[in-house]
Image: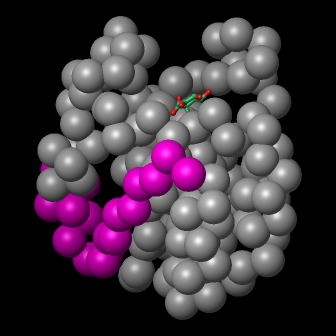
Amino acid sequence: KKIQIINGPNLNLLGKREPGIYGDVSFEDYLRQLRAACPQCEITYFQSNSEGELLDKIHETGFVCDGIVLNAGAYAHTSIALHDAIKAVTAPVVEVHLSNIYARETFRHHSLLSPVCQGVILGFGMDSYRLAVEALNK
Ligand code: DQA
């Protein structure tokens, strides 16, 4: 299956950003492991710090791939535009967060994306992405 992973703002800093919360592995290194663990999936990856570029990538891939794994970072808590984009496309979207957002500051407790995603996986660090890919690969 064709799975698109999309990471939002600040996730380009994975590995160096608050390692106590997000771990010390870069996403590029993790992606190598994930592709090896899931050879039957064709996994493509995109990261942007810009909301508009995330919207464009959802529009571009959301009608042609078999599923999107989306960690929208802080935009999960703020973006009605991402909510609308997820609703607009035909591919199922799994929302992912590395951290358990419900165990953190209250401003992270609400996601505008969860209601329009097929499912949500959070709190398992990088392994959250593998769980999401497996869910979409069914
Ligand atoms: C995050 C959680 C968000 O609250 C935060 O803004 C992020 C990362 C996570 O993966 O745990 O940037 O999406």
Q: Which residues are magenta?
A: 33-50
- Is any atom of residue 71 visible in this view? no
Query: Viewed as shown, does residue 95 lie left or right of 3?
Result: right
Which residue is at 34% across, 70% downward?
44
Query: Viewed as shown, does residue 53 lie left or right of 43?
Result: right
Query: Viewed as shown, does residue 38 lie left or right of 33?
Result: right
Q: Is residue 66 above or below residue 102?
A: below
Which residue is at 79% across, 58% downward?
81
78 or 65: nearer the eye? Answer: 78
Q: Quadrant of ligand 1?
A: top right
Q: Position of residue 93 (x, y in %)?
A: 63, 64
Q: Is residue 129 above or below residue 37?
A: above
Q: Position of residue 96 (x, y in %)?
A: 56, 44
- Is any atom of residue 39 visible in this view? yes
Which residue is at 75% across, 68% downward?
85
Q: Is residue 46 above or below residue 126?
A: below
